[in-house]
Every structure is written in structure tokens, then in C-alpha cells.
């Protein structure tokens, strides 16, 4: 319970109500702000506390100042004013802690707020300290929320702390008959999750079945706690070899049962790279997150992971960068946006740089020279960056700052959450900036490679468009621009091989004296030439071209030249029958390598929604896919770390 303002200033009497029509008293403003904190109306609370502080009320009482700081800080941590929130709590918490029981509630809530913020930031050491401090400051069943949180951030440490913590929470719950079955089931579910991560799957399965019974069984009405228990039951059933029950439990979470939701795909999504946090290809995780209305991801937390805390957090960090289009996110019912689970594995390597990479680097350097500066959205997810990019474009346009307007427009053109229909207008803005700023040919060529006005162009039309750009005298005279365009034109595309003049185009890149011998575009051209010669049966010539790269076969597989798909391998027979029977839809992102003869190698599901349902079916589709052949000595891999998404959609009923 909050302590009133009068207790803080030692007046000893309650404040009288303000006369009708009079301005609220300081007491009333303080109480209103405190009530707003308690009710979760943080925007109102912060505004009110800011006004109290600005009006000088806190200067008359150090205790009042400390209370305002702590209560406001609780609302600020984890938000745009996070640094101020932490500073507020750090300033006020020692004062309140010294006052003992009267302020125990404030101290508890402050530590919980700091713990939640640290947990969201994946700073589990800090979260452990604050959750433990919160629990130590209260007694009895009031300790349970902090103990539950403490168990969640220690359950990947495998040192017994998480189990001892959740057992204490269960003992405390057993002392209070008013806890109720559903709350007891929620606590048991956390214990089962701890056991799952400790490899004690059978015990976890038994506890989760009891939790389900306490919640009323597999009913068609669900809340967040029901979904958590059933989702954990699916993991436990799978780990106990009970695949049919796993699918059934998952079906009763609602996962994979919503048509036309963004969970059939996302706008921007990448798995973690093996090696991060010690991740290995055999590691696996289930990660839970919330999908906000604007399409960004929040509340990311690992639920199950093989290995230790570092691995669990590496999986979770990867999800924080995912994005959906806002219009797709809006299709998902709020309950299912609140807690969604994804199955994850790592990939051997991140995506290879595109052929246009050197042109983009030159363009970015030129924009920096023109004063564009480092964008505010750097390192943000696409959905979080979107409003900043739009605001930057509007502001720069209003001020006539062409460089910053072009920077923002380029970011929007490349954003996966921007509708394709908006991109032609953005390209118009970009081209106007190119002219106004007398842009170098590299920047103009880079913009010309952006396909913003016709996303359905067929390979022949696209090659013709690029040839027209290459025919411009200034472009043909610029080594970087010409080499990039020739490589793009020469690549196989969409089940079609390279053009008839591919060899001549590639030779022009290789023989251009203006590019260093080890330039990555020259290396790419040599590899492409080897492919063309091998396709003609000239294996000796292909080997000679390959040897000129100076790279090993393994290094060549990461250059970024991707064979074209000849056959997808997908058919109606690939839809798992049990998924049809349960009405599941979903998607899988599979990672695989491509052999020199175009066969796929070692496909494995790296992201799957819903978990467990479509993994093998997707891998089977990838195994049957075929790509154009590529020359590699001794049959080495042509392309490593390739990724393909597979959607599983039922016919409209």
C-alpha cells in the first residue's frame, strides 16, 4: 500500500478536500499520481510527478522527493527515459529502504521494475539481484511473484537455484487456501519448465498434466496461463516421445489455427548464427515473444533451450530483431499476440553480402560526406525503425536537406515493412536528391539497381533494364558500377540459366584493370566464369578460373553467388496428414547447403511456427529441391548456409 503524502511530510493529518472548482491540492495531485502508478497508467503518473517536481513540492521534503523519484522511476525504466528512471530509483531507493516497513511496498515494486527491465534486456545477473532483493523485502505469499521471476531467470543455470526457488513458492502457496487452483497451476507450470530445462522430462510431464487438470482440462476457452501450460505440455510430451499428444496439446493453444495471420510469415526474420553464445547446430530452443500492434517484437524470453544460459539468451536475442507489417500484426487476436512461441535453431553463417554491396558502401560514404550522419534507426528492427525513418524523411524534406531526405528514403525503400506500392514515390524523392546533389555515378547506379516500381518483372525484362543502365556512358566508364551491373546481368535467375553473353560480361569484369585483382566482384566473376565453362563441358577451363580466385572451395561457398532454383520440390503430398486432421497451418524456415551438382545437402528447420508440426515436411521439400549446377573442385559445396521458407496453408473451406 502506498504511504500518503502527509505521512511523508509528518503533518500528521489528512488533507481536506479542495473546495469545489478549486485547483487540486499538492496532496491530491500526489495521490492521483500514485494511484496512476498502481493502476499501470504510467503516462499519467509520469506527467503528474514531473509537474509536482517542477512546482517545487519535492524540495521541501527529502522523503517526498525520494518517493516521487522511485514511483516515477518504476514507470520510466525500460522505456525511452530508461536512464532517468534508473537514476530516479537509485537516488530514492536508499532513502525509502531506510524507513523500513512503511515503504516496503515501494522498495519491493522498485526492485521488481528494475528486475523486469533487466530481464527484458537479457541482463540476467542484474535481474537476479533485483528479484532476490524484492523477495527479501517481503514475507509470506507476497514473496511468490518475485520468486517466480527469479526461477525464470535462473532456470538455464542448472545449479539447483531455480528448483529451490520455485519449490519455496509452492510451499508458500500451500499455506494460503485463497491462492486457488488456477494460480497454483501457474506456479506448477513454472516448476515443470525448470525441470524440462534440467532434462527431467518425465517429472515435468506429470506436473504439467496436474496443472492442466487444475485449470479445467482441455477446454475451448483459454487465457494466457492455459496457453502457457498447454504449450509446455507439448514440449514435455515431445521430449517423452509422445508426439501425438504433443500435437494435440499444441492444437488446444490455438497455435497454427488462425487463417491469414502474419505467423505464416514475417517481414523480417533471421535465426541466430552458430557460435553466438556457444550455439551449436544441434542446439534447439523454444522462444516466446509478444507481437506489438506496430509489428515490432517485445517481451522476448527463452522458454526451453538445450545448453546453458548463454545459449538460451543467444536464441532470444535473435528474435528481438524480427518485424511484421503493422497491418498483418493487427489481424492477430490480442491474446495470441501477447504470447507466441517459435522453435529455433542456429545457422552456420549469416547471409552472404549481396553483389550490390560495394555500390551501397560507396553510396553510404558519399551521403556521410554530404552531412547525412548516422541515422537514429541504426541497429533497430525494421518495425521500430519505420516511424523514425518516416519522421526523418518528412523533417528533412521540410528543411530542404536533400542528403538526409535521401538517406531516409533509401532506408524506407529497403525496409521489409514498407508496402511495395509506396516505393515508386520514394524512388522519385531519391532521384531528385541525386540530381540536386550532383551525385557520383556509383550512387546513381546503386539506386538504378533498386527494383521499386515493378516487383513482378521477369528475368528477361530485368536483364534488359540493367543493360540499359550499363549502356549509359558514365556508368560504363565507372569500374565499380559497370562490374556490378555485368555480374547482375550474368547471374542465373528464377529457373533460367545465364544469358548467352554471360562469358563476355564476366570476362570484362575479370579483365578490368581499374579493379584490384582481389576485389570481391572480380572473385565473384571468376567463380561465375567457372560455372559457365563447366556447363559447356570445359572442366579444365573451369578449374583454371577457379584456381585464379585464390580461395578454397569452402571460402567460395560464402561469396554470395547463389545458384538458381530449377525445381522447388513441393507438392500437396508434403502436407503432414496429422496437421490436416488438426487444422494446422504454419511455416518453416529451413537452412541447407547446395552441392555443386545442384542437390540440397543437410536441410534442417531453423525457425518453425507452430513448433514441431512441420519440421520434417519442410526438410523433405528442401531435400527434393534442385538448383543450377556450379563448378567446384572435388565436388565441394557450391553454396553454404542457404535458407528457404516453406508455407503450409490449407485450402479454403
Image (cartoon, helix red, strand yellow):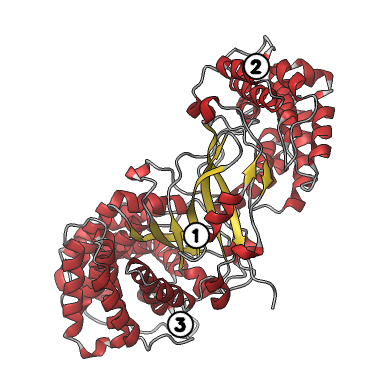
Disc 1 residue crowd, few under 14, some 14–19, many 20+, Cα 10 Å: many
Q: Which residue is mark 2?
A: 541
> Are circles 2 and 3 on residues that touch, CB within 8 Å?
no
Q: Which residue is mark 1?
A: 615
Image-quadrant location for residue 173: bottom left
What label sits on residue 222 in the rendered view?
3
Q: Secondary structure at mark 2?
A: helix
Tag 1's secondary structure?
A: helix
| N-term mark: 2 or 3 | 3
Q: Within 10 angstroms of label 3, few (less than 14), some, or many (20 or more) residues?
A: some
Question: Distance of mark 2 from mark 1, alpha carbons?
Answer: 41 Å
Disc 2 and disc 3: Cα gap in Å? Answer: 66 Å
In the rendered structure, the answer to whether residue 34 lies left or right of residue 638 reads: left
In the rendered image, which quarter contains the C terminus?
bottom right
Label 2 crowd bin: few (<14), some (14–19), many (20+), radius 10 Å:
some
Q: Locate the N terminus by quadrant.
A: bottom left
Residue 521: quadrant of the picture: top right
- Image point (29%, 58%), residue name: 89
- Residue 198 in view in this figure: yes
Point 39% across, 46% down: residue: 281
Amino acid at each position: 500500500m502506498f504511504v500518503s503524502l502527509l505521512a511523508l511530510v509528518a503533518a500528521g493529518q489528512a488533507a481536506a478536500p479542495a473546495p469545489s472548482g478549486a485547483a487540486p491540492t499538492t496532496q491530491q495531485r500526489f495521490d492521483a499520481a500514485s494511484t496512476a502508478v498502481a493502476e499501470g497508467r504510467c503516462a499519467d503518473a509520469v506527467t503528474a510527478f514531473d509537474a509536482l517536481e517542477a512546482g517545487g513540492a519535492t524540495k521541501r521534503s527529502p522523503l517526498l522527493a525520494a518517493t516521487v523519484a522511485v514511483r516515477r522511476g518504476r514507470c520510466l525504466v525500460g522505456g525511452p527515459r530508461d536512464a532517468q528512471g534508473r537514476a530516479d530509483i537509485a537516488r530514492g531507493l536508499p532513502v525509502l529502504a531506510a524507513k523500513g516497513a512503511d515503504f516496503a511496498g515501494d522498495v519491493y515494486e522498485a526492485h521488481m521494475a528494475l528486475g523486469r527491465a533487466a530481464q527484458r534486456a537479457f541482463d540476467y545477473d542484474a535481474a537476479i539481484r533485483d528479484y532476490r532483493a524484492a523477495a527479501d523485502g517481503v514475507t509470506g505469499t507476497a514473496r511468490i511473484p518475485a520468486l517466480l521471476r527469479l526461477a525464470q531467470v535462473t532456470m538455464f543455470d542448472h545449479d539447483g537455484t531455480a528448483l529451490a526457488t520455485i519449490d519455496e513458492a509452492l510451499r508458500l502457496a500451500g499455506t494460503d487456501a485463497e491462492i486457488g487452483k488456477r494460480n497454483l497451476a501457474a506456479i506448477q507450470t513454472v516448476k515443470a519448465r525448470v525441470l524440462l530445462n534440467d532434462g527431467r522430462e518425465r517429472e515435468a510431464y506429470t506436473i504439467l498434466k496436474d496443472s492442466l487438470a487444475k485449470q479445467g482440462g482441455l477446454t475451448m476457452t483459454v487465457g494466457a496461463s492455459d496457453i502457457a501450460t498447454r504449450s509446455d505440455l507439448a514440449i514435455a510430451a515431445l521430449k517423452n516421445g509422445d508426439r501425438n499428444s504433443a500435437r494435440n496439446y499444441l492444437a488446444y493453444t490455438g497455435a497454427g489455427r488462425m487463417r491469414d495471420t502474419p505467423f505464416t510469415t514475417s517481414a523480417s526474420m533471421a535465426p541466430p548464427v552458430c557460435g553466438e553464445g556457444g550455439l551449436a547446430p544441434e542446439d534447439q530452443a523454444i522462444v516466446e515473444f509478444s507481437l506489438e500492434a506496430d509489428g515490432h517484437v517485445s517481451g522476448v524470453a527463452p522458454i526451453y533451450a538445450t545448453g546453458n544460459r548463454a545459449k538460451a539468451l543467444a536464441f532470444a536475442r535473435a528474435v528481438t530483431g524480427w518485424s511484421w507489417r503493422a497491418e498483418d500484426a493487427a489481424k492477430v487476436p490480442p491474446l495470441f499476440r501477447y504470447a507466441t512461441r517459435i522453435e529455433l535453431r542456429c545457422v552456420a553463417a549469416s547471409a552472404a553480402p549481396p553483389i550490390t554491396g560495394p555500390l551501397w558502401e560507396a553510396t553510404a560514404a558519399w551521403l556521410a560526406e554530404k552531412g547525412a550522419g548516422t541515422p537514429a534507426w541504426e541497429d533497430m528492427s525494421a518495425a521500430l525503425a519505420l516511424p523514425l525513418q518516416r519522421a526523418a524523411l518528412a523533417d528533412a524534406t521540410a528543411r530542404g536537406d536533400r542528403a538526409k531526405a535521401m538517406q531516409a528514403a533509401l532506408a524506407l525503400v529497403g525496409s521489409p515493412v514498407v508496402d511495395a506500392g509506396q516505393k515508386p514515390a520514394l524512388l522519385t524523392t531519391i532521384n531528385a536528391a541525386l540530381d540536386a546533389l550532383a551525385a557520383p555515378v556509383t550512387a546513381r547506379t546503386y539506386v538504378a539497381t533498386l527494383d521499386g516500381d515493378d516487383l513482378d518483372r521477369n528475368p528477361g525484362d530485368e536483364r534488359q533494364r540493367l543493360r540499359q543502365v550499363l549502356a549509359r556512358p558514365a556508368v560504363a566508364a565507372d569500374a565499380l558500377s559497370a562490374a556490378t551491373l555485368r555480374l547482375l546481368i550474368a547471374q542465373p535467375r528464377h529457373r533460367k540459366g545465364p544469358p548467352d553473353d554471360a562469358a563476355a560480361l564476366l570476362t570484362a569484369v575479370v579483365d578490368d584493370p581499374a579493379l584490384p585483382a582481389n576485389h570481391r566482384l572480380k572473385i565473384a566473376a571468376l567463380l561465375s566464369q567457372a560455372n559457365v565453362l563447366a556447363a559447356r563441358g570445359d572442366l579444365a577451363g573451369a578449374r583454371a578460373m577457379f584456381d585464379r580466385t585464390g580461395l578454397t572451395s569452402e571460402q567460395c561457398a560464402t561469396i554470395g553467388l547463389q545458384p538458381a532454383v530449377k525445381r522447388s520440390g513441393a507438392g500437396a503430398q508434403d502436407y503432414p496428414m496429422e496437421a490436416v486432421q488438426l487444422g494446422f497451418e504454419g511455416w518453416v524456415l529451413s537452412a541447407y547447403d547446395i552441392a555443386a551438382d545442384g542437390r540440397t545437402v543437410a536441410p534442417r528447420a531453423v525457425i518453425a511456427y507452430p513448433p514441431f508440426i512441420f519440421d520434417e515436411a519442410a526438410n523433405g521439400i528442401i531435400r527434393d529441391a534442385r538448383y543450377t549446377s556450379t563448378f567446384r573442385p572435388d565436388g565441394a559445396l557450391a553454396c553454404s548456409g542457404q535458407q528457404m521458407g516453406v508455407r503450409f496453408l490449407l485450402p479454403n473451406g
